Structures are given as C-alpha cells and as structure tokens.
Image (tube, rainbow, N blue to C red):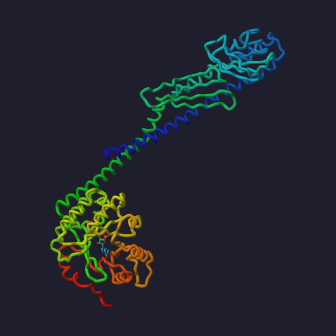
Amino acid sequence: MLILGAGLVPIILGMLFTAVEARHSLRNQQTVTANALITQTETLSDSAMQITRTLRDFKGQTCLSLERPLQRLASRYPYFRALGVLNGAHVSCSSAYGHDPGELNVMIQHALPQSTGNWGISIAGTAAVPERPAIAFVWMNPGDFGVYAIVEGQYLLDFMRAVSEARHYQLKISFNGGYTFVTGQAQHAPLLPIDPVIWHAASARYPFDVTVITPASEALRTWRDIFLIFLPMIAILSLLFMVITANWIKRRVTWRDRIKKAMQRDEFSVAYQPVCQVSSGCCSGVEALMRWQRRDGEWERPDIFIAAAEEENMIIPLTRHLLSLLARDVESWPVTPGFHLALNVAAEHLQHADFVPDIERFARQVAHKQFQITLELTERSLIKEGEAVAKKLAWLRQCGIKVAIDDFGTGNCSLSYLQTFELDYLKIDRGFINPIESIEGETPVLDAIISLSHKLALNILGEGVETEMQYRYLSQRGVGFIQGWYYARPMPSDALRTWLTTDGARPLQHPTP
Ligand SMILES: Nc1nc2c(ncn2[C@@H]2O[C@H](COP(=O)(O)O[C@H]3[C@@H](O)[C@H](n4cnc5c(=O)[nH]c(N)nc54)O[C@@H]3COP(=O)(O)O)[C@@H](O)[C@H]2O)c(=O)[nH]1
C-alpha cells in the first residue's frame, strides 16, 4: 500500500503540474487567436471608416448624380454590401437600392443607437439580405447629411470559421452590443469535471469584443498531450519513489526483525560500567549498557541499534529484555544494600502505560539485593507528555527509585526537563568534560552546569572521564560521582563480579606522578 502510494505521488503531482501547464498553454493560444480576430476586424473597420470619410465628400449631391459613383465604389471594395447617404435616419441614396430606399433602421433591421457622429453595430442581416450578418458603419447628424457603409459579415465569418475548425474553438464577436457572430461549438463534456476555458478580449480602437471558448474536450486533449510529453519523466520518478520506499520499508522491517530475532536467539547481553563515588574513592554502583553480539561474532554498535530500536518502536521490548537480563545477572553479584544500579529509559517507554508496572515488576524481582535503582532519562528522543511522565516518575521516586537526567546539555530540552521532572542526579555529558585541559583552566559551560546542579541540590555525575586531570578538575568542583574509562570500562557481568571483589573493593589509587 505504502509503496503504491509513493508511486502515486509523482503521478498526482505530474497531473496537477501538467493541468496548470495545459491551462497556461490554452490561455496563450486563446490570446493569439483573439488578437488575430481583433486585428482582422479592425482592418475591416478601418476600410469602412475610410469609405465613410470618402462618402462625406458627396454632401449636397442628388441621388441621380450619386448613384453611379456609389455603385462604382461598392464594386471596387468587395467587403461592402451597400454604401449610401442619409438624410437624418432616412436613406436618401444607396448603391444597392438607388434613390429613396427607406429608413436606415428598417434597412439594417436594428434599432438605431442614440449616438450621432460615427458609430457601428453588428447586425443579423439587412432588409435585402436578411440571412447574412453584417456590420453597419454610420456617420450621421440628426436631420442632416450622413453616410453609411454596410460591411459584408461573410468575410469575418469565413475567417472565424477557419480558425474555429483548425483549433476546435467557439468564437464570438459582437460590435457595440449588436448581433453576435458565432462560429464553432462549445460542447460540454458531461462526464468530465472540466469546464470550457473562456477568454474575453476587446479592441482598443473600436467598440467590439471577442470571446474565445475552448471546449472541455479540447482542454482535455491539450492536457493529455502535455501529460504524455512528461509521462516518461513521471514514470521514472514514480518508479524511483517506489524503489526508495520499498528500500526504506525493507530497512525498517529488517531492523525490527533483526532485533526481534536477536532477542529470541539471546544475542543481547549487558555491560556494566562502574561508577566511582568521589568522597570514598570506591565503586558506588554501575550503569547497565546494552550489548549485541551477532551469531557471526560481530558486535553491533549500541548507538546505532538503540537509535534504530527507538525509531522502529522496538525500544520497549528491548528495554524489557534488558530488565530480564539484569534480573538474571545481578543474582551473582557480591554487593551491599544501596549499591546503585542505573539503567537507560527511552521517552517512548516513559510515555507508555506499562512503564510503571514494568519498573515495579523489575524492582520486585531484584528487591532482595536492595539496589538503589536509578532511571536515566536521555534527551535523545523528546519526552512529549511531560506532566503525565512527571507523575509516573514522582510515584516511582516515592517507591525509592532515583531519577537522573542523562547527557545533560546535549539536547534542546535540558532546562525544561529540570523544571518538569523531580530529579536526583544530573549526568554531565562527556562532550563538556573532554575540553578540560588543566586544573586551573576555564571551562565556562561545564562550570555553569556544575554550579546550576549545586543550586538545584542535585547529585552530579561526570560521564566519560578519561584522565586523572579531568577526575581532579571535577572532584575539586564538587562533582560527587565519576564514570569513565579512567575509573573502569564497561564490562560483562562475570567480569564485574570479579572486579567488584578486587579493584572495586578498594579506593581509587591515582597513579603517582
Ligand atoms: N535506552 C537505552 N540506551 C542505551 C542502552 N545501552 C546503551 N544505551 C545508549 O546507547 C548509547 C551508546 O552507548 P555505549 O556505546 O554503551 O556507550 C556508553 C559508554 O560505553 C560510553 N563511555 C563510558 N565511559 C566512556 C569514556 O570514558 N570515554 C568514551 N569515549 N566513552 C565512554 O558512554 C556511553 C554511556 O552512555 P550514557 O548512557 O550516556 O551514560 C548511549 O547513549 C547509551 O545511553 C540501553 O539499554 N537502553
């Protein structure tokens, strides 16, 4: 399902992208078409305006003397159906009808606009040719001399038809709100959720406007053509997404499966790193650290498999497994009551309803050893349900369990943890201890952490102490507990048992200079 979903992402994005691209391309084509139609109509209008200017020179002449020049002019320009002169709204002479053919509104079969001077209007037909549209261009003065030219609409219609057929558009043009010339069809596609694409444009020079309508079927065809161009790329991306997702799932499954199998095969063990109490110089306890040795003898790195377990929701089963290993290991340890046993708990486990029962069960299992159990909270994964977790920890503290904040200062929430949770120990991350170069040297951040811990009355443990100088620096500043290779490395349970009776039983001896 997830792999399929990943494969669909580029296809859906590709469809959206090509739909936008198709709309853009349709708009461009429509603009070009509208401009061509406007130019053609303006050219016709220019000719008509030119001829009406010529006709004005006939003012004062009788129809008898005008009839032949009018006919000559009309036959010279094939665009014109009729030319004539007016007396007010009355046609006093016409190239088509001779003298006294009637009223202009009857001839153009359209009411005359209120305006005088130059005007033009598209009409469905004239009295003599009612079935063919035309455009009437008129120059008139009320009760006075005027002229008109009727432009044959067929030329415009033929041009529009040619464009409509070539591009499958519906085209409309209307002059001054008059008759609308229409060519082509704007079929709707009832089964498609697509509307026809409509574009309006108007001439800047004459009072006419043009509408270009791309039918839904044509819009779909344009989109399909563009989609087909991008299809190879979309298919490659889709495949890539599926492969990446499949790999990711495989990796996920692999870590989950591997951790599960490793638990069944008993490949996990626990290493214990002793902690030195500065005041006595003796071992006050240990931190339990998970180890994984594969069947082939290779060791998995704890930072990697712990992070994987946290990511793959395996940290709770793994911690439960750790608790069972701990319960088995501690049986043989020669320890006195109050010996510290620290273990790491992940945020997911803390937030889980079984967290308190899990820890209580473990505490009961090892109760006869009278350990001082300490839970170490790390900032590696953020504890989200702060209040609820704080309540659980408060309850466990009442039961005698201690709480430590681990890797202090490495995450974003160290200070908020200090405020949210009741704590007993603060473990200073080795990142702050590494820079110690001399006893007198300045390590301002480390000093600030130590001073903060004192103010909060927290026990302080320095992690990753590798040198005597680091040990002395920390002990001189009141750090009560030291953990690190300088004192002891993490070791298996059997080795710890021996160590506790030898090195662990006597105070730390610093090498003499
Ligand atoms: N939730 C759980 N987290 C666990 C568990 N076991 C381990 N971890 C976490 O994994 C991280 C890596 O741990 P690890 O490789 O075991 O490293 C620990 C020590 O070996 C190392 N260390 C100790 N002293 C020194 C030193 O002097 N120098 C040096 N270079 N390294 C040293 O530090 C790690 C101690 O980690 P911390 O817990 O912060 O005290 C690590 O984050 C573990 O927390 C588990 O069971 N559950």
Residue displayed at 52% across by 25% down? 165
Q: In the current view of this chain or complex, which residue is farthest to the left?
A: 332
Residue displayed at 73% across by 24% down? 49
Q: Is residue 226 above or below residue 104?
A: below
- Is 268 left or right of 468, judged from the image as shown? left
Q: Is residue 432 above or below residue 245?
A: below
Q: 40 or 179: which is nearer to us?
A: 179
Residue 235 lies in what quarter of the image? Answer: top left
Q: In the current view of this chain or complex, which residue is farthest to the bottom?
A: 513
From the top left corner, tell me how far across and down residue 86 is, in percent. 77, 15
Q: Quadrant of the N terminus?
A: top left
From the top left corner, tell me how far across and down residue 144 is, in percent. 81, 17
Q: Quadrant of the C terminus?
A: bottom left
Q: 192 or 204: which is nearer to us?
A: 192
Ligand 1 occupies quarter: bottom left
From the top left corner, tell me how far across and down residue 362 is, in percent. 21, 64
Residue 312 lies in what quarter of the image? Answer: bottom left
- Is 175 left or right of 418, judged from the image as shown? right
From the top left corner, tell me how far across and down residue 476 is, in percent. 38, 83
Residue displayed at 56% across by 33% down? 30
Q: Is residue 87 above or below residue 407?
A: above
